[in-house]
Amino acid sequence: MPGGRKLPAPFAGFSPFARSLIFSAAASSCPKPFPLPDASTSAADADAETPRQDDMPRPPSKRAKRTEPSSDEVEDHGSSGSEEESFSTSGSDSDSDDGEESSEELETVQADFAFFDPKLSDFHGVRLLLKTYLDSKPWDLTGFVDLILAQTTVGTVVKLADDDDEEGEGNGAEKANSSNNTDDDDLFGLISMLNLGRYAEEKCIKDLKEYLLAVCADNGTKKQLRYLLEEKASSVGLLVCRRFVNFPYELVPKLYDALFDEVSWATEDEPTKELRDSFRFKHYLLVVRMLERKTPAKHKSKKRKDDDEPVIYPKLEDEILHELSSWSFTFPIRSEQAAQQEMKNYKEMGLVMAIKADAVPKFRKKLEDLVSE
C-alpha cells in the first residue's frame, strides 16, 4: 500500500457480540478512513459544491439530474455540475502515557463523505471492492464492474469529499491534470441494483448464475433459485453492496435509502418504457458474507457470554435482510482470509438471500432504528 498504509482487518457486525464491537468503537472515536491504493485511471471531476452537514441529516436526493432523459451508457460528468451529497463525521483519538505525568491529548479527525453517481474513473476502486464477490472463482469480474459503472441512474459510490470542491478551488481541467487526482483513492463503498433479465446475455451474469447454482446444495432451494434466475429474471434485481470495514455505519441507512429511492424514480424518469419496466422489481437477490461458528460452544462464560454466537454478520444490515428473506442458503468460502484472533472460532461463509420487494419498507425502517439506537 502507498505510504505504508494498510487496510483495516475485517470486523463483525450487528449480532450482540458484533454490535458491541461496532458501537463501542464508534462511540469513542471515528477515525478518518484509510485511502485505497493509487489507480492508473483518472478523470475530470468538477462536481458541484455542497455545504458541509455536520449533524448528518438524511442526504439530499440525486433526483435533480434525473429530470432530463437519462441513459445507462457510461458517462463522465466532467464539468456538468452533477450534484454531490456530502456528510461529515468526526471523532477523537486519545493518547496517554502511563509512565509519565502527561495530560490526555484529544485529537479530532474530520472526514467528509460524499455520494456520487458511478463513472468510468471509479473502475479500479470498484473492482477492488468486488474482487472476492464470487469467492476465488475465475469469472468476468471486469464485465461486472463495467455494468455497474454504466448504470448511472441507479447506483452510488461513496468517497471522501474533495477539500478543493468544498472550498470552491480549481476547476475540472485542473483536477484532471493533477497527478494527485485519482478517484479510486477515496472510494470506500458502492451500492447498485442490476436487473438479471436485462443483462442475462452478459458473460458476467451467466458466470454469476452458474456459480450460484453450483454452490447451492439443497435441491429444493436450488429449484427456487433457478426460478428467479431464469423464469422471473426480468423482475429480479441483484442488490450489490460492498464497502470497506471503516465505512461509517451511520451512513448505511442513507446508502440504502439512496438506492431504493433511485429505483423508484427510475420507474418514472427513464426515457423508454422498457427501461422504466426494468426497474419494477418484485424480488431482490443478494450474495453476502457471514461468519459461522466452527464448533458449538461448550459452555458459557460470564466474562465472555457472546462466545457462543452461532452467526456473526460483518455488515449490520445483513441480519435484518436475512430475517426478512423468503429463502436463503449458505455455502463455504474457499478463499477464507485469516481471521483475527477473536474470530478464530468462526469460519467465513457465503450467504445468498431472496427478498420480496414489498419487504423493503420494513427493512429500511428496521435499519434506521438500529443505527439510531
Image: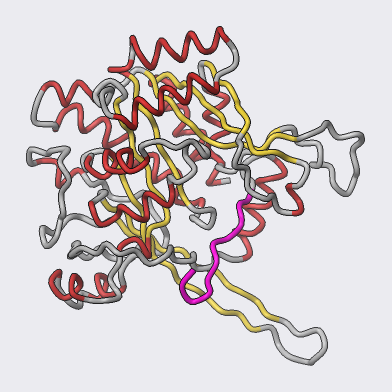
x and y percentages locating residue 248 in the rendered image: 49, 55
Q: In the figure, 74 relative to 93: above or below? A: above
Task: Decide whether residue 3 is among the magenta residues.
Answer: yes
Q: Would you say 316 lies left or right of 275 here?
A: right
**Rendered location of residue 173, percent (x, y):** 13, 72
Q: Which residue lies at the image location 72% right of the left edge and 82% below the top edge?
A: 96
Residue 78 placement, left or right of 212? left
Compared with 248, 154 (above or below) is above
Residues in magenta, as a range: 1-11
Residue 50: x percent and y percent?
25, 63
Total numbered badges shown on the rendered structure: 0
Furthest residue to the bottom? 101
Secondary structure mostly taken by the magenta-highlighted segment of the chain: loop
Point out residue 358 in the picture as x, y percentages from the top left corner.
39, 19
**Residue 253 appears left or right of 6:** left
Q: Nearer the viewer, residue 357 or 314?
A: 314
Q: Identify the residue at horizontal 63%, vertical 53% (top origin).
A: 23
